[in-house]
Image (cartoon, helix red, strand yellow):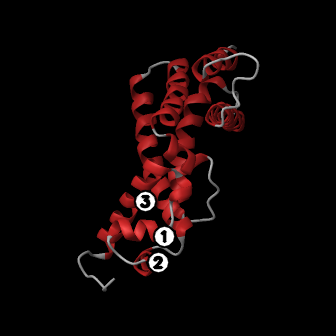
Amino acid sequence: MARRKDHTREELTELAIACGREIVIREGPAALTARRVAKAMGYTPGTLYNIFENIDALVAAINIGSMHQFADTLRSIRQQQASTEGRVRGIAQAYLDFHQQAPQLWSLLFAVPVQHESESYHQAIHAIFAQVTEAITPLSSSPTEARRKAKILWSTLHGICLLQQSGKLNVGQEDSAEELVAQFLDQFLAR
């Protein structure tokens, strides 16, 4: 493939992220390779590696986009819900919705290990987790307890979704993820 100069570096970055995201949505995280993304872009893999250090950097960029969208969803929930319980239940439902509506992007974000460290990646994670912690703060006696409760909530949601996705949630009897999360939240929110 001949060298092309159709796009600026910024445009190439956005194109790579968009193409990578589409591959993940259609075929899952395992289908995300430099060769496939470059082909979808209409460029060589070398061009992709001029933009991203490695495939994990591209995965991180795709995940950052997903995290920004999810953070926006959480901000909207926190603005719309006046009560602590409403906010926590809204956050839990948003997590379930993300898993159900975009399972491949959810997997890329929450179930695929990423070997990438950057300030923008950590900021995107913090933009989500800080909102969860803030929503739980009224239920907590200290900032440390709020952070721990946020981790418990997040881990429970993640575990239920991961078990549902792998087909291992319904052992012995069928229970929906929504039912299990609702029962957990009843206990979690009880004072």
Q: Are marks 1 and 2 in contact (CB under 8 Å)?
A: yes
Q: Is residue 19 above or below residue 39?
A: above
Q: Say which element carries label 2.
A: helix
| Residue bearing the label numbered 1 | 34
What residue sits right under mark 2 in the picture? 49
Figure quadrant of residue 12? bottom left
Residue 68, x across and y down, in percent: 43, 48
Residue 189: % across, % down:
65, 18
Whether tag 3 and tag 1 are in contact, CB under 8 A, the answer is no
Is residue 5 shown left or right of residue 145? Answer: left
Residue lying at the far bottom of the rendered structure: 3
Figure check: 95 above or below 114: above
- Dot 1 falls on a residue whose secondary structure is helix
Callout 2: few (<14), some (14-19), or many (20+) C-alpha neighbours within 10 Å?
Answer: some
**Residue at horizontal 44%, vertical 21%?**
81
Closer to us: 72 or 58: 58
Query: Which residue, given by chain and number where applicable, does mark 3 sit on?
Result: 20
Label 3: how many residues lie within 10 Å, few (<14), some (14-19) or many (20+)? many
Left or right: where 2 falls relative to 32:
left
C-alpha gap between disc 2 and disc 3: 13 Å
N-terminal of the two: label 3 or label 1? Answer: 3
**What kind of residue is marked 2?**
Tyr
Secondary structure under the numbered disc 3 in the rendered image: helix
